[in-house]
Structure formats: C-alpha cells, structure tokens
Image (cartoon, rainbow, N blue to C red):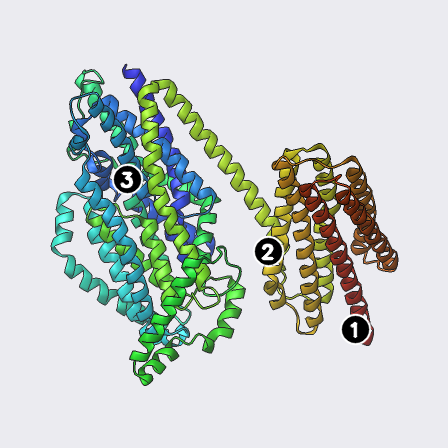
Amino acid sequence: MDTFYLILVIVLFGLAISDLIVGVSNDAVNFLNSAIGAKAAPFKIIMLVAALGVLVGATFSSGLMEVARKGIFHPGQFYFSEIMIIFLAVMITDVILLDAFNTFGLPTSTTVSIVFELLGGAVAISLLKIYASTETIADIGNYINSSNALMIIFGILLSVVVAFTVGAIVQYLARLMFTFNYKKNLKYFGALWGGIAITAITYFMLIKGAKGASFMSDDIKTMINDYQWVIVAISFVFWTLLFQILSVTVKKLDVLKIIVLVGTFALAMAFAGNDLVNFIGVPLAGYESFLAFRESGAQPDGLLMSALSGKISTDTYLLLIAGLIMVVTLYKSKKARSVVTTSLDLSRQDEGTERFNSTLFSRVLVRQARAAARGINYAIPKGVRSKIEDRFNFEKVKESNIEQQKKDEVSFDMIRASVNLVVASILIAFGTSLKLPLSTTYVTFMVVMGTSLADGAWGRESAVYRVTGVLSVIGGWFFTALSAFTVAFILAMIIYYGKMPAVFVLVLLAGFVVFRTHMLHKKREAKKSERDKSIATEVKINGKSIIDKCAVTVTEILKEVPMAFFSVIKGLANEDLKKLRSKTRETSALNKKAKFLKDNIHLTIDQLEEDSVESGHYYVQVLDFLREITRSVHFIAKAATTHVDNNHKGLLPEQIEELNQLNTRIADMFKEILDSISEHRYTEIDSIISAQLELLELIEKTNKKQIKRIKNKEAGTKNSLMYLGILSEIKNVLSYTINLIKSQRDFIIEQDIDNIEE
C-alpha cells in the first residue's frame, strides 16, 4: 500500500515540474512586459535580472504554502486517500488548463486556477462523503473552509479594481510631473523619483516579504519589524542622495533604467514569493500527507489528515530547486513570449494593427467614457485644464519619440515602465505580507492597463479595440475559474471511482494535451514568422525593392488560386466534404494573409524613401486587388462546402464538365501570369488579356447553359444558386487579376522612365 501512494507522490512531483513550466510561461508576462516593452536593457540582461529575482523570491514563499494545505478546505475532515485524490485532480487540471491558455497567448491567473481547482476537487469528495453518510448538503461547510475561500476570492477580485485604479492615478501624477519630454525634467525630479521608487520596493520586498522567508530566523524578522520605519527613512535619503550625486557626476546615467531593472527584479521576486505556492504547494502538501501516513501505520481510509492543519515550514532547498526550474523555463519557453506579446499589444503607446476587434459593449463603454470626460473637463477651470493638457501633449515630442520607437521597437517609454513595475511590485508584496495569494497576473495586467489609459495610449483610433482586448482577458479569467472548478470536480470523481488506472489514463491525457498544444503553438508561430517576413523589414524602401517585394507576395498568393479551384471542383464532383472543409480552411488562411498585408500597409509606407511615393501608391493597389482575389476564392470554397455539408443535390455531369473546362483554361492563364510577374516580363500581357476575355466569354456561355437548365427544371434552386455564385466569383477573380498585372506593368514602365530621366 505504501508503494502505491509513493507512486502517487512521485506523479504529483512530476506534475509539479510540468506545472512550473506551463505556469512560468503564463506568468512571465507579469515581470517581463515593462522592461521588454520599454527596451530598458538588452534582452539577456533583462532575463538575468528576472532570473535572480525569481531565485531570491522562491525562498520567500514558505509561509504561503499553507494555502494549499488548509486555505480552501478543512484537512482534518478528509482521510489520506481522499486528500491524495483531491491533490491529483488539482495538479492534472492545472497543467492542462494553464497550457491551453499559454498556447493562445492569453495571460490567466495561476492563483485563481489553483484556488478553484482545490475548491472543485474538495467539493467533489465532500459530496461523495456526504452521500455515503447521514449528512445533508447543508453540512458541506464542515469540509470546505468557505469563509477563508471567499476571503481569498474577494481579495483577488478586489485587487483587479485596486490595481487598475492605483496604476492609473500614479501614472497620471508621474506624467504630470515629467511630461512626455521626460528627459528634460529628469534632471530636476529624477533623483527624487528614484529615491521614492527604490525605497518603496525596499520596504515591501524586505520588510513585508521577510515574514515568509524560509532562511531568516525569527530574531532577524523581529528586528526588521521593529526598525522598519528607520530602514525606510535611511533608504529614502540614501537612494535620493546617491541618484542625485550620480546624475551630476555620471553624464550618461539613466535613473529610469535603474528603476526599471530593479523593479523587474522586485516583481520577479514578488511573483516567485506569491505564486510558487500555485505550482508546488499541492505536491508538497501531498508529500507531507504521505509522510504522516507512513509514520502513523494506519490505513489510507482510516487516517484523518489533521496533521496538515498545523504550521509546516518548507525546506529552502526545495524552494530553490523550484526556482531553478522556473529560471530555465524563462529562457526556453516560447509560449511565454506569446503571452508577453498580448499584454504589450494592449498597452503600447502607438497605433497599429489591433489584435482584437471592436464589440458593441466596448463601443458603448468608450462612448460613455468620452462623454464623462467632456463633463469633467467642463468642471475644470480653463486655465488649469490648458496647463494639464500641455503637460500631456504628446505632439510636442511625438516625432522624436516615434523615430526612437521605430529604432528600438519600444511599446512605451521608461516613465510608464517604471510606474508599472513599482506599483505592481508594491501591491503584490503587500498582499503577500498579508498571506493573501493575490493573482500576480491580475495585478500586473490591470496596473499596465491603468497606466496605459492614464497615459493616453487608448486614443480614439485604438480605444474600442483595447477595451475589447481587456474585457476578453478579464472574461478569460472568469472562464479560468469556472473551468478550474468544473474540471477538477470531474477529475476527482473519475479518480475516486477509477483508482490507479484512472490516474494513469489522466496523466497520459495531460501529456497528450500538452504535446498537442505545443505542436499547435509551434505551427502558429511558424505561420506568424512567415507572415511577418512579408512585411517590409528594411530601414528604407525604394521603388526597386517594392517591385521585388510585390512580385514575391503576388506570386505566393496567385499560385494558390488555380490549385484551390481545382480542389473545390474535385470535392464538389465527388461530394468530398472532408476535402472541401480542408480547402475552405486553407483559403480562409490565404484571405487572412492578404487582409493582414493590407491592414499593415502603413508599416511599408512609413519606411518608403521620399522619392518613392508612386511606389507606395502601386503597393496599395496591388494589395487591394490581392485582397479581393482571395476573398472571392474563399467564397467559392465556402459556397461549395456549405452546399455539400447541407446534403443538397450534387453537380450534374455537364456542370462538372463545364467547370473542368474552366479550370484547365484558368490554370493555363495563371501559369502565364506567374511567369510574367516572376520574370518582370510584360511584353506578353496582351495575350493574357486575350485569354481573360475568352474565359469571360466561356463563363457567359456557361451561365446561359445553367439558365436553360433552370428553365427546363433540370437543376434545383440550391444547385443553381451555388453554381451561378461560383461563376460570378470566377469572373471577379479574373478581373482583379488582370487589374493587378496591368498595375504592375504600368509601375515598372514608370520606374524605367524615372531611371532614364535621372
């Protein structure tokens, strides 16, 4: 029996390693986004600072381990065998859930996950115990620590509001002090801001965080507590004077970079101190349960786990091992970069492609916020309002900031980055000091959103999209809670009845899910990398490079057109729904690629040389035509798929023959077009136009044949609508393709004339 439960403990620790990996991938955004977004230092330096913070913070998390043991349920009411079921259900759920969110680049909360997983697993086992006894559902409070669980949940939700509000207020005051032209004012207020920031971090990291440190003796903790205000005063004076002296003596000293790097260290430390419990708290509780069971000599179903109700400290070496795994994950995880990207997209200062679409709710919310802002402005005296607007006037430094932003690829400036880190680290460390397992994701994300709002990053061009993104992430948090509770509840039931075989199957399932999501993420990143290569990357682009760029882009997309048409005809003729669905997905991806290129056209235009304006006009035309071509191709595939999926009558033999004839002619025409574009050879364009005209005549004849079939009742309504729709879209494809090749021909002629004149 001991061997059976020893295997379960080993499984728990194996799951803990997986949980550390997927958990850090999710939570890395919490302490990396500000430093990376502002490019405070080279990436390797940022990662080194964060890694040190994680290692130090790991030793501060011992006190929080009690949450996994007794924070959500009363362990004394559960037998050892039942406790192990709860812990296994929690860990399997956590690995699957966090990995799924990481794959889609959505920052979720590891704290909320673990709390609701513990709640779901404990409720499941509690209901089974109640069902097997004379108790009723009203007695579930004997098993669940409902008051503490509600306090934790309330604290997490309250932290969302507090983080957003405090972040917005502090950023507003900081921007009011420094303005966007902060380098000018930094020499006056930089030392003071640095002193406040580093002192605040010192106070909450050392004084408040020391309470949970596994390596500090009680005497040292008492001394720190007794002299905390003396330490604060000395720290403030020391850091302020040091920054002031250095700013005078060291010309290239950047106080804000120091604050951001120290803040990154502090936030990484706060993350490890607060969130390590989410990853290893449950396995450690399982290990302690196993030790108590082995020492007792009792039966698994006869030993109540009252031993978990006492205070148990976690060995420092275990915390450091967990910290090392987290550090390795930081350097290796590509999913962590995806989650960071989402946060940066929603908080960047500049406009551009938005990841989220607008919704009715976001539009109404933005409209109401603008109306409220106008009301507040009317209440502020005009002179005061004018001075405030002047302090927030980004236009004064917009040109220089944008050029620097393009050069460094920063999402926001160092002022906002420093506020993000200082405020978030203070709030998280304060929650940790109160033994509240706050969600570091909720706190840091909402601080970042609050500072971006106060900084005017959510302008009229981007506000609705940013609001939709924030609401989507917050909605994902509620989905996390519901999913965590439900899945842990179900898995606890399965393990309870299925015993060891169920554990084996579920662990394999978790491994399979992680593997599948890894492959999905890898595939998506490969597509994203390929797509990004299609956007201009040179510092400056001239007419020649535009021609070459367009030739590659056009060739890649146009070569898919005849192949898509061929597959659709074959799928329709054979009523092959699987093939049609596959082709619909492919044409949808092609359509999205063209849309992405068109939506990001400003990135290329911005990099054009001054004498290549006509090149930009040409590029706009080409992308317009490409977008319409891919839209029509996708419509053809979708119409055919819908027709077969609805089990409507298939194509008539003569219709298949007509479409095959069109397909052959289209394939020949597109081959000639692709050869002309790739070789910049347009002397044969007249023959291509002639081929197009012949095809249009053939389509007209085919249309007339179909009308006769309708008249003679040979073709049904659904068949006719689908068939005529496909013919119409083929005409559109041909027209847009000819316009595209004409545009490219005219542009090259114009470029040749310009070269001769030069």
Report the residue at 23% width, 26% height from top. Answer: 289
SS of the residue under disc 2: helix
Q: Amino acid at mark 2?
A: Phe
Q: Are marks 1 and 3 in contact (CB under 8 Å)?
A: no
Q: Position of residue 106 (x, y in %)?
A: 43, 47
N-terminal-most mark, 1 or 2: 2
SS of the residue under disc 3: helix
Q: Position of residue 499 (x, y in %)?
A: 33, 19
| 12 and 148: which is toward the camera | 148
Q: Amino acid at mark 3?
A: Val
Q: Position of residue 190 (x, y in %)?
A: 33, 71
> Residue under circle 3?
115
SS of the residue under disc 1: helix
In the rendering, which numbered label is found on residue 754? 1
The C terminus sits in image quarter: bottom right
Q: Residues within 10 Å of mark 2 (few under 14, many from 20)?
A: some
* Horizontal relation, residue 561 to residue 658: left or right: left
* Residue 305 appears in the picture as rendered: yes
| 405 and 694: which is toward the camera | 694
> Residue under circle 2?
596
Q: CA distance from mark 1 to mark 2?
A: 31 Å
